[in-house]
Image (cartoon, rainbow, N blue to C red):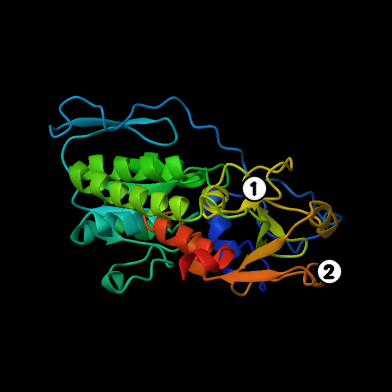
Amino acid sequence: MNPLRDFLSPGLPLGLVAILLLVGCQDPDPSAGQDDREMTPPEAHTPPDRQDPTTTPEEEGWPRTLQDQAGRTLELTHPPTRIVSLVPAATAILLELGATDRLVGRTDYDDAPTLEDVPSVGGGLNPSIERLVVLEPELVVRFEGQQDRATPRALDRAGITHLAVRPDGIDDIREMALLLGRALGRMERARELLTRMDQELEEVRDRVAHAPRPRVAFLLGGDPPWVVGPGTFLHELLEIAGGENALAELEAPLYAPVSVEEILRQEVDLILALEGAQIPSALRRLPLVQLPEGVQSPGVDIGRSAREISRKLHPEEWR
């Protein structure tokens, strides 16, 4: 999937594109030099105080009120039967919740076979509002981020209800699943998904609890390389998997470009990178382990992603 292709250089690694889309990076081109334009770091996300969707009274009754991950309050009079999802991770959760028949629109980057006949509205950011409106959705699930303020304004003008999500960290992913479960009237299934996710994460944490923790630089690609910073689900998965993020103390929110020299100064034991990610030659003298691109999806399969990372860091613990 390449939902930022209109904004990115042609050689940008696929995994980096997906990650930058999900965190709402304002300047996602790591190949552009700072001499040409100032690099703008990803927006730091401080979740507003929000109502816990698991504690709302009469959660099975309609109408029901939700507070999304932008801190907005919206009311649903009935379970939406026509949904457009602009967030691939949310689309995957909707499928897990049994809402395949309710999806009437998706992005170009939702590639599940069950969605092959579902119309696309383009990218997750700045989708085609014309195509979206024709689908007559009762609910649109969209990204929350400053890089796309036009979409929510256009949806408001069209009178279309929209639910904002932003899966930065694991708690955000949990909240996204609960919000979607509540919106569909399928909270029990949402909780079952989260129970499975939590069990998988705990299994990984327990498996490597006594293993040594290597200092890891998690690279997404580019030159200078973009790295996984604190406040991200990948940072949390790295720690659960038995590693220490060597770049966690840098003043870079979420995902950001970091110089090769800075990475080398952090006494890194291991480079962790997505398959196909560009690795600067100066870093290739460090041990390198590659991960499948699937680990960068912030959905309910993060337990599987944690296991993949842990197997690479501690193969001896998984024999």
| Residue beneath the point at 47% across and 58% down | 306
Q: Which amino acid does label 1 sit on?
A: Gly
Q: Which of 283 and 34 is in front in this view?
A: 283
Taking 117 as reference, is 307 left or right?
right
Count of marks, rendered view: 2
Residue 137 placement (x, y as % from top left): 26, 51
Which residue is identified by label 1?
Answer: 229
Q: Using a 10 Å C-alpha cutoff, classify the residue at mark 1 as few (fewer than 14 neighbours), some (14 to 19) or many (20 or more).
A: many
Residues under numbered marks 1 and 2 in contact, where contact means CB atoms less than 8 Å apart = no
User: In x, y percent, where is residue 120?
Assistant: 36, 66
As helix, strand or loop, the secondary structure at mark 1 comes to loop
Rendered image quadrant of residue 157: top left
Instruction: Say whether residue 123 is visible.
Output: no
For this orientation, the residue located farthest to the left is 61
Disc 2 secondary structure class: helix
Q: Residue 124 carries which label?
A: none
Find the residue positioned furthest to the front.
210
Which amino acid, mark 2? Ala
Residue at mark 2: 282
Asked whether, in this view, residue 33 is left or right of residue 137, the answer is right
Q: Position of residue 37 (x, y in %)?
A: 80, 53
Height in image: 45 above or below 245? above
Q: Residues within 10 Å of mark 2 (few under 14, many from 20)?
A: few
Q: In this view, does 176 lie to the left or right of 289?
A: left
In the rendered structure, which disc, 1 or 2, sits on the residue that comes first in sequence? 1
Expressed as whole percent of the image width and height from the top left, the position of residue 221 reads: 67, 65
Residue 247 in sight in this render: yes
The image shows residue 193, relative to residue 281, as above or below, that is above
